[in-house]
Image (tube, grey):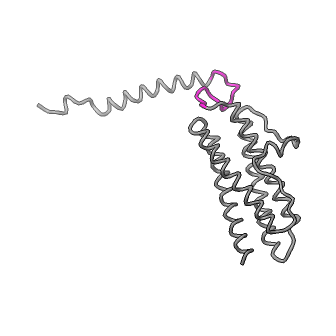
């Protein structure tokens, strides 16, 4: 007796799987029509949306304070070695502004409102503003701020987990740039010491 007789036809298996999937597609379509005003936030969103928006507003404040700190350092850097360091400050300020924009966009996607209010900005921020006047102190303070951002963003990524993959990805992308900033600043510190 041929053993293949007792096995389901491969095409039949594929059709059965497709039929199950199509049923899921129909349910997806049905659910998509419900609460349409929620935009990208669906019933399968796993995180506490209000808490995520609140945390993202802290990240927004952190990025805005970083922009302000880097801008101040860019404009006030002085000394024989200041030009290349100031240029690094300028570049970092632009990248931090891009991070703030990405976070604000994500807050809006989640149905929240980005908090750009200058009132309380420093208390919402994870990093601190700095008014150092000496170049080495500026670099050190910027490195401290980057390390604060790195650690807090790593914690946010772990906290979000798989509950909100889009927000996690936004924070991970920002985190990668913050790590590059820290590396840049460590190199500058080493060059300044030699």
Residue 36: x and y, percent? 67, 24
Query: Which residue of the protein is positioned furthest toward the left in this rendering?
Result: 1
What's the residue at 19%, 29% (across, down)? 5
Where is 182 relative to 1, above or below? below
Left-right relation of 174 to 18: right
Left-right relation of 106 to 33: right
What's the residue at 78%, 52% (across, down)? 97
What's the residue at 46%, 26% (across, down)? 22
What's the residue at 76%, 60% (across, down)? 142
Front residue of this view, candidates 120 and 9 = 120
User: In terms of image quadrants, where is residue 6?
Assistant: top left
Residue 120: x and y, percent? 85, 41
Where is 150 relative to 36, above or below? below
Residue 83: x and y, percent? 82, 72
Front residue of this view, candidates 155 and 54 = 155
Q: Is residue 42 magenta?
A: yes
Residues shaded magenta: 33-46
Quadrant of the image containing the C terminus:
bottom right
User: In terms of image quadrants, where is residue 28?
Assistant: top right
- Would you say the magenta stretch is mainly helix, strand or loop? loop
User: In terms of image quadrants, where is residue 56?
Assistant: top right
Count of numbered tags: 0
Left-right relation of 122 to 192: right
Q: Is residue 74 magenta?
A: no
Quadrant of the image containing the N terminus:
top left
């Amino acid at each position: 007796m041929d053993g293949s007789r007792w096995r389901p036809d491969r095409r039949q298996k594929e059709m059965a799987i497709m039929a199950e999937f199509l049923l899921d597609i129909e349910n997806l379509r049905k659910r998509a029509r419900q609460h349409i005003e929620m935009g990208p936030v669906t019933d399968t969103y796993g995180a506490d949306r209000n808490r995520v928006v609140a945390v993202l507003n802290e990240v927004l404040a952190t990025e805005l304070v970083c922009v302000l700190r880097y801008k101040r350092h860019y404009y006030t850097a002085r000394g024989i070695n200041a030009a290349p360091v100031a240029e690094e400050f300028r570049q970092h300020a632009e990248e931090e502004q891009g991070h703030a924009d990405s976070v604000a966009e994500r807050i809006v996607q989640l149905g929240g409102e980005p908090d750009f209010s200058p009132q309380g900005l420093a208390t919402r921020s994870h990093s601190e503003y700095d008014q150092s006047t000496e170049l080495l102190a500026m670099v050190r303070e910027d490195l401290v701020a980057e390390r604060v951002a790195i650690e807090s963003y790593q914690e946010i990524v772990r906290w979000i987990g798989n509950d909100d993959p889009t927000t996690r990805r936004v924070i991970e992308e920002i985190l990668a740039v913050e790590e590059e900033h820290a590396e840049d600043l460590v190199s500058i510190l080493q060059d300044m010491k030699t």
